[in-house]
Image: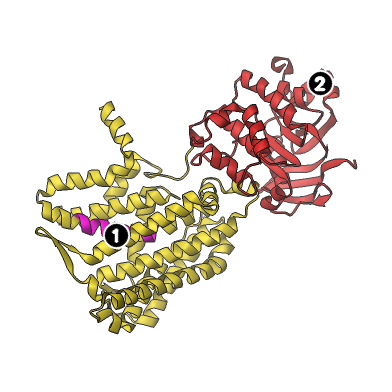
Chain colours: A yellow, B red
Amino acid sequence: MKRLINITTKIGGINLLPVGIAIVALILIGNPSTWLTLTAAGLAMGMMIFLMASGLSLIFGLMDVMNFSHSAFVSFGAFIAASVLAWLSGWNESGSVLLNLLALFSAIGSATLFGMIAGFLFEKIIVKPVYGDHLRQILITVGALIVSEQLILAVWGGSPISVPRPNFLRSSILIGDVSLETYRIFAFGLGLAAFIALRLVLNRTRIGLLVRAGVENREMVEALGFKVERLFVGVFVIGSGLAAMGGAMWAGYETLITPALGAHMMITVFIVVIIGGLGSVEGSLLGALIVGLSGNYMAFLFPKMALATNMIVLLIILMWRPYGLRPAVKL
Amino acid sequence: MSDAILTLDNVYTDIAQYHVLHDISLSIPKGGVHVLLGRNGAGKTTTLRTIMGLWRARAGVIRFQGTDITALHASDIAQMGVAYVPENMGIFGGLTVEENMRLASKTGNFDEVRLKRIYEMFPAIEKFWKSAAWSLSGGQKQMVAIARAIIEHRELILIDEPTKGLAPAIIDNMIEVFHEIAKETTILLVEQNFHFASSLGQTVAVVDDGRVVHRSAMAEFQSDKELQTRLLSLSLDQHQ
């Protein structure tokens, strides 16, 4: 047993948890092609949730700010992307992959840009006055979530909006008898790229070093001569932009969106942040992949349990590791 | 005192609804080691945190090199050349020793001469340079915390109980290191270990119940056993 633990630690330890879940699922499902389809869906979903969760984790980790309106950026991202795609339907429907890509990147780009600008204003106007006061943070950010949901209702109306995927992402790739949706592959790739970029910034730059240190001990970073509040604005902007990007991708994944999307995703995103460990980008990725995979497997294996999956995962992981899988703060 | 690097005039600090410091006045001369003594809960740590700008003084004036720093942000005070080594050491456990050190230098680069001296003072730092800081022992973490404070020239270093939890052999080593550091800077030291404090300190101030109740040269205080017993109300012999 001890040797087994040693070997697993050497090849990745806790990072192997999603692989372990996938292997158990393969045994339970039995059919490799069904399993592969579910796994691809789970990975794509996990990566989109990661986009939404990573910013929230850093925001909480760095300034201890509880931002319940984080999912408003997800909603706005989804609706803005839907509008841009509808507006660029000529490019979107075209047979040219280049025009498709242009439409797609315009949609994701506008959503992300909106998220960043809105995040900047949101931090300055709503969050800054309530630094250090959790109760007020919860009240005002929940309030902001309600207001933003109403804003979406006012602008886009209450009926569900259909989101056209770009033409080249409507097909599937056939591997043997397994069909993989290209949209899912793209979603996975985008999430992975965001993760790698975040990691590079956090691990290779001085600003990243300051963020990692600030998540652990903000006061000490200040005592070393740095203004963490300024750093935090940057983290908030990036986090909000990523949430909107996640929302944009989610819109294309669901293809039918309603204003309740954000509030619905919020619960999942919070669960991911908690099981991953606060303040840790790697933890968020791990949590998001676990939630994405287990959600898809459970929906297939035990459909009646599907809704409870996230809660069960949360419960098990917190009983095992009360601070989450990979908390940023090491004592 | 005109050659004072740091003065506190009638400083009051509240933490939440509690009045912790009542009328602290201190004058720390430039150069050497100066010690703040006092019982647990007397207000020593609060005094250091107030100087560093981590707690806000409700009243009174704190001057560093003649400049009023009472209302300044901790980061600005640090930029002026004050370093702070908190009681819990403030090590970033998830970062490597190197990253911990890098954060403490303004540019992120090291002055090779200083770094070499630090390696000589604390060989463990060179040995564990690339290791995650959480994996170090308590004594090694304390070394990183102190090295971080001296990786660049600072005018004043505030150090809170550096000997806490350390083995006696390490403490003796630390005395030498502090003597070395104090040659080029000023240290304001909060300490419970009287042997450590008296081997290093030039002046001493005793804080009790948020007030300064005694100020003198260390030699004078050291020779007055009756005063020590009265102010610190513990048998100091066992510490000597």
Point 32% across, 67% down: residue: A249
Residue span colored magenta: A39-53
> Which image quadrant: the N terminus of chain A?
top left
Amino acid tagged 1: Phe
Point 32% across, 49% down: residue: A314
**Alpha carbon distance from label 1 to label 2:** 70 Å
User: Which of the chains bears the disc numbered 1?
Assistant: A
Q: Is residue A178 above or below residue B218?
A: below
Q: Nearer the viewer, residue A24 or A178?
A: A178
- On the question of residue A204 being in view, the answer is yes
Q: Is residue A316 left or right of residue B52?
A: left
What residue is pinned by disc 1? Answer: A188
What residue is pinned by disc 2? Answer: B222
Q: Position of residue B205 (x, y in %)?
A: 80, 32
Mark 1 falls on what kind of element?
A: helix
Q: Nearer the viewer, residue A321 or A117?
A: A117
Point 60% across, 31% down: residue: B142
Amino acid tagged 2: Gln
Q: Nearer the viewer, residue A86 or B45?
A: A86
Question: How many numbered dots are placed on residues in this image?
Answer: 2
Q: Position of residue A180 (x, y in %)?
A: 18, 62
Badge 1 density bin: few <14, some 14–19, many ≥20, Cα 10 Å: many
Point 25% across, 81% down: residue: A94
User: Which of the chains bears the disc numbered 2?
Assistant: B
**Same chain check for tags 1 and 2:** no
Majority secondary structure of magenta residues: helix
